[in-house]
Each structure stands twice: as structure tokens, then as C-alpha cells.
Amino acid sequence: MKRSLAALPALILLALDLASCSKGLGYGVVLWAPQGSPLAAGEVVGVARKAQEQGKLAVRSRQLKGLAELEAWRLALYPARSQAEAEAQRYQPYKDLFAYSLRDGLPLREQPNQEARRVYKLRQGELVKVLERGQAKVLIATYEDYWYRVLTEEGSEGWCFGYFLPVFPSAGDPQAEAARLMAQDPLLDALVSTAWRPEYFREMADSGRIDLERFRPEIGFFIDAAKKQALLVLPDFHQSWDYREISSVGPNRYLIAGPELRVTMSSRDRLVLTYFRKEQQASQVFINFTGDLEQAIKAEGERRQARFKEFFDRGPVMSSSGYGRIRLQTGSRFSWEGFGRLGDQVFLRQVQGGGTLDFPYYLSGGLSGRYDGVVTFRFNEYKPGEGTSFLYKFDEAGVRFEYLALRYIQGDEAVGVSPSALVIYFSFGKS
């Protein structure tokens, strides 16, 4: 959105054509004062006339002796002083705010909307003046930030999504301040200082479905700059690397332990980690997870305890004529006696009968009306994460279990059941 004399309000255009008018051409608010000028951003000035040089205006203020010439794009023009003063008051929070682009080709748009027409593309490192900020943060893909209305040094104006546009205050030399900030390499600082979590952490937190095997505080990618050590912990993988230095090998790309451990920073809050796993190259997305990790884990634990309590309150003993007796104990524990041929039919290996009752899975839409939930028996002999699961449905006297084979579990959902699935009925009792 190029600012030019042709883009000025109709009243200002009329005034400019009447250059001989002794009352001047209206008023302006200085948006971006030239470096070293006695004028200041946010100041109201009188517009006396067009300057001899095309695209410039002659202005007057109390800070000037005589007139000064300014590019027209540096001003917001109004026919009445009261209008200019109202704009100057609105502009106060932004008068010292600047920003620079982290990406080459970062678009400016006509409106604060990613579908709006693009009016300009910023160069990487290009300085802009912040004129306005959107009222609330918005989410675009996986990125969350404000929209900013900005002005370039070429006089182009538009809205820019702020995720790749660091905003900073400067009452002195904004170019020098931007250069200092860029030299600091904020992406490298973020890489070293952030506890990086797998991308699925945010997906789980947003959905409210937490897999406690995969959503734990120790899981993630961490850099200990003091020890010069990088650590990767996944639910099924663990490795550490010692390094001498983290080397920049291109825009947003870093080597930590040579080619064995590489990072591409797509933003301050998102990276792609490339590493070797069993002599095979692997890549995974990590994010700066800002949610309350401990609270999410606590809430999920409470949800599972509530499900266990539904069983326990109906009677701590469940009895079946063909499949024995299950005793429920505190701490979500169980002991199963006389399970008979179930051990060969659905258990993963030979078990003694003790373990933990768990509720890690949810019902898909197609099953939610037919069943009350999914219960998983984790026997002591099972490996972490293993379990034998059943769909269940309560009635007044007991509960019906329907065996849920692994092929009918997708992610954290039960999505179906075999037509020939094993069905067991247990009655509740106190002893």
C-alpha cells in the first residue's frame, strides 16, 4: 500500500491543488521522523505547502525554525487539527515501536487477514515502523501472534503477521538497534534456552486427550549450554551428544554434533531435529510448548482415577462364572483370580493376575453410544505401555466386557470391534 500524494484524502488533494491558499494544507502526524530531525514521531505539524521536490511536503512546528521538508509517506494527513491531535493520541503507544523481518519475502497485506491482497514483500532484516497492533492474537497454522500495521522506509504500508516480525522499542537509532538485535541471533538463543517438546504435546493439550506414556516432563530435546551437551528423550528412544560449539551453516540452520545432530529453526518456537537412530537418519518436529505440563498430567490422572472410581463404587469385586474374580484395590490396582483360558486367548503373555487398571483410550463417535468406555488391564508382567483392553458397558447389576483387539485402536481411540469379539459379563459385589 504505497503512500503517495495521489492516495491522500480528498480534502487534502483539494488543498494541495490550491497551493496559494494562505492557511496552509492542513495538519499531519509524524509517523516516522528522519534520523537526526528535530521532529519526533507522534508530533502534530502544520502542512504549509508542497515542496519543490516531488513527493515531499513543507511542514512547520514549534520545534522548527522555519519550514522543514518531509516525504509525504512519513505523515498521516488531516484537514483539521482536532483530527490530527486525535490520531496523535491513538499513536502514542506505537510512536517508538519498530520491527524487522526474520524472513525474506514476508508479506504485507491490505487487511489483517492471510487471504487479503499482498501489497509488499519485506526483505530479511528490513526495518519497518509499527503503526498499529491488532486487538488480539490469532492462530495461523501452528503460529500464534498479533497482526501489525507497519510502514516501510520506501513508504509502503500494510498489515504483517507478527510471528516472524520481532517488535522492539527505540527512541534513538532504530537501524542500529535492529542490527544489534539481529547480530544476537535470537533463533540460536531460543534453541539453547528452550525445553523443546514433540509437536504432539500441543495436539494432546489442545484436544484434552493426554497419553501419559508419551506426555511426560522428561520427554523432549534439551541443550545444556554449561555442560555443552544435547539430550534427546522420546518414549522409545534416548541419546545424548557432547559438542564443542553450535555452528550456523545457513539461514536458520545449525550443526550441534556435526552431521549427526542438525537443527532447522522454522521460527523461535518451532524446529526440525535431524539425528541418527540405529544408523538410520530420522527427523522430528519439536515446539516450545508453553502450556502447563504438570497441570495437564494432573488433570489426566484425575480423569483416569474418576473412571476407576466408577468401577470401585459399584462394588470392589467383579465375579464371572467362567472367568474368575477381579478384586479392585486402592491405587487403581487389581488382582484377577481364576481367569482360566483368557490367558491364552487375549493376554499378551503368562501372568500371575496382579496389575493396574488404566483408562488411556477414548471411544470414537461410532462407539460412544453403545459403550461407556474402554478399560485396560496392565498386568505386572507386561512391558510399559502394554495392556489388554475391553470395551465396557454398565448395567444395574454388573458390567459387560467386550475384547478390544489392537487393530481396532488408532492413536488414542477405539474405532471398532470385531463381530466375533469375546464378551464377558461380571457381576459386582462387596466380597
Image (tube, rainbow, N blue to C red):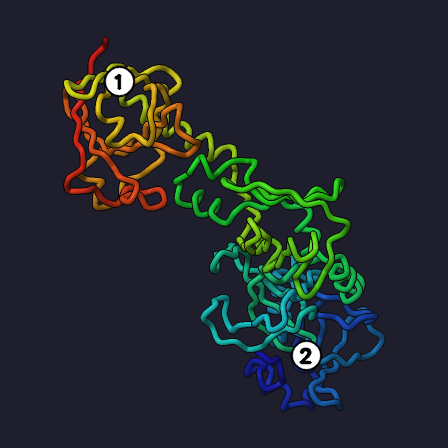
Q: Quadrant of residue 263?
A: bottom right
Residue in the image at 50% along x and 66% along y: 112
Q: Amino acid at mark 2?
A: Glu
Between 94 and 300, which is closer to the camera in this rendering? 300
- Tell me if I can see residue 195 in this picture: no
Residue 64 percent across, percent down from the top left: 82, 73
Judging depth in this view, the residue of 377 and 150 nearest the camera is 377
Q: Residue at x 63, y 75 (%)?
A: 77
Q: Which element type, helix, strand or loop, lies under badge 2?
A: loop
Looking at the rendered structure, the kind of residue marked 1 is Ile
Residue 146 in the figure: left or right of residue 332: right
Mark 1 neighbour density, 10 Å: few (under 14) some (14–19) many (20 or more): many
Residue closest to the eye, 50 or 236 = 236
Identified at 68% across, 58% down, the residue is: 254
Image quarter in which the C terminus is found: top left
Considering every residue shown, the one lying at the far top of the view is: 431
Residue 144 x %, y %: 52, 55
Q: Which residue has dot 2 on it?
A: 154
Mark 2 vs mark 1: give the one in front. 1
Relative placement, left or right, of 386 versus 86 is left
Label 2 Cα crowd, 10 Å radius (few <14 / some 14-19 / many 20+): few
* Foreground residue among 183 and 75: 183
Q: Where does label 1 land, which residue?
A: 326
Quadrant of image for the N terminus: bottom right
Whichever of labels 2 and 1 marks the residue nearer the N terminus, that label is 2
In the rendered view, tell whether residue 414 sits above or below residue 166.
Answer: above
Judge whether residue 236 can be spotted in this image: yes
Q: Position of residue 280 (x, y in %)?
A: 55, 54
Residue 248 in the image, given as x and y percentages of width and height: 72, 60
Please say if 309 is above or below 205: above
In the drawing, does residue 380 fall left or right of residue 264? left
Tell me which residue sits at (54%, 62%) in the image. Answer: 147
